[in-house]
Image (spheres, rainbow, N blue to C red):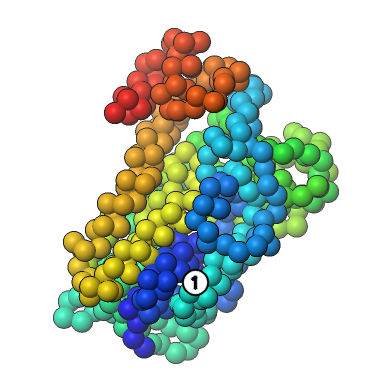
Amino acid sequence: MKYDVVVVGSGPAGSVTAMFAAEAGAKVLIIERRAEVGVPVLCGEGISQKVDNFKVLEGTRWMAMKMEGARIFSPNGTIVTLSAEYAGSETGYVLYRDIFDQELARGAVKKGATLIVNTGAVDLLKKNGKIAGVKAQRFDETMDIEADIVVGADGVESRVGHWAGIKTTLKPYDLETCAQYTLTNIDWPTPYCDFFLGKKIAPGGYVWIFPKGKDVANVGIGILSSMSESGKALQLLDAFIAKYPELKKGSPVRLLAGADPVGEPIESVRDHLLLVGDAARQVDPITGGGLMTAIEGGKIAGEVIGKAVETQKFDAQTLSEYETRWKEAFGRKLHRNYVAKEILLDMEDKTLDMLADSLKDYKFEEFSTLSIIKAMVSKHPSLLVKLTPLLKLARA
């Protein structure tokens, strides 16, 4: 088996990379270790409406709800409301994530990529000390898949990256443990995605409610691994639901559990190799959301791969255009949000309430990090010391 590119993982980052690489003329293979693309679902299922700009999806089968924006609830219940334009990359549409992933994979195949399921990478294939593809297993059969470029789209703590000598292991303070119910027969009629903050509610994270229909919603929690013990996420989520009669009467039709990187991105390029999406930690450190960066980064990766195949140059220097471009596109934002995450972790609930109080009536038509910080400090000057590192970044 010989391809220009083998993509390990059929999630959004892998499929979009394959889509644009195939469109550029590369011979692409996607391998997926699971039996079905997009199953099990592994996220809260929210994405920005900016996904429309990338034109990687057809139709609306993947869409459960179109949202007006987001509401953020501080520990004392103060509400900050954001329109969809400013609400971040996790609000805009609530998805049927399994269908969403399958539609992206279908788009890659339509562009010419080949997809094989039930096939997992077990190691990198090397020749003369250089990466030359992957070793894979499908049921009882092992195979060598030769490729000029290997794309690691295999998620959190990427094994592909690890095999290439990249440090992919996450520290507990850069990892969120998550749990989520899809509840039916609830009464939460809102056109917003809701987020609830507070150390007692979700230490180092938040609870979310993403409506998926008239009486259905995803209700989930993410908490920092360094601030909790095993199983704590589900206990806290159950306690949160029990406080709201509108949710408590609901019945779970699905329970998901997993982990999410909330650290800074890592090295994403080696000779003959790229990491994309969660594998490269291209995830918002505040929210843990990575769908939009997966799509944007995947598009960049696919375009760079197309050039590399055309010129037959696969060294790190050639492929580094990918790292340069994704850093220009969203790298600064991820770094700023990592700094913001560290600041927020040091804040007591009382300070979070002050932040919310500063912003509850803020006119977001002038939205920017700098203008928001100024608004908060003007109402609560005592916040200046805590927000100074973020203020410096905003002014840079």
- How many marks can you see? 1
Residue found at x 49% / y 56%: 54
Quarter location, residue 255: bottom right
**For the C terminus, which image quadrant?**
top left
Residue type marked 1: Ala
Left or right relative to 227: residue 233: right
Q: Which residue is mark 1?
A: 108
Q: Residue 286's x, y, as percent?
A: 47, 38
For mark 1, does the 10 Å Cα neighbourhood hold few (<14), some (14 to 19), or many (20 or more) residues? Answer: many
- Is any part of residue 57 visible from this angle? yes
Q: Tell me the quarter of the picture where residue 331 sits.
A: top left
Q: Is 182 located above or below residue 164 in the figure?
A: above
Would residue 231 be seen by someone viewing this image from the given angle?
Answer: no
Q: x, y (%) of residue 210?
A: 67, 45
The residue lying at 49 percent from left, 45 percent from top is 288
Q: Circle 1 sits in a helix, a strand or a loop, which is it?
A: helix
Give how far across and how far down residue 318 sits, in percent.
Answer: 21, 63
Give 196 or 272, whichever is nearer the viewer.
272
Closer to the camera in the image, 180 or 89 = 89
The x and y percentages for residue 60 are 67, 59
Quarter of the figure that contains the N terminus: bottom left
Residue at 36% of width from left, 23% of height from top? 391
Question: For this view, does 201 lie left or right of residue 367?
Answer: right
Q: Is residue 252 above or below residue 80?
A: below
Q: Is residue 308 above or below residue 182?
A: below
Please give the name of the residue rendered at 61% of the width and 33% of the height, measured from the top-left corner.
Answer: 83
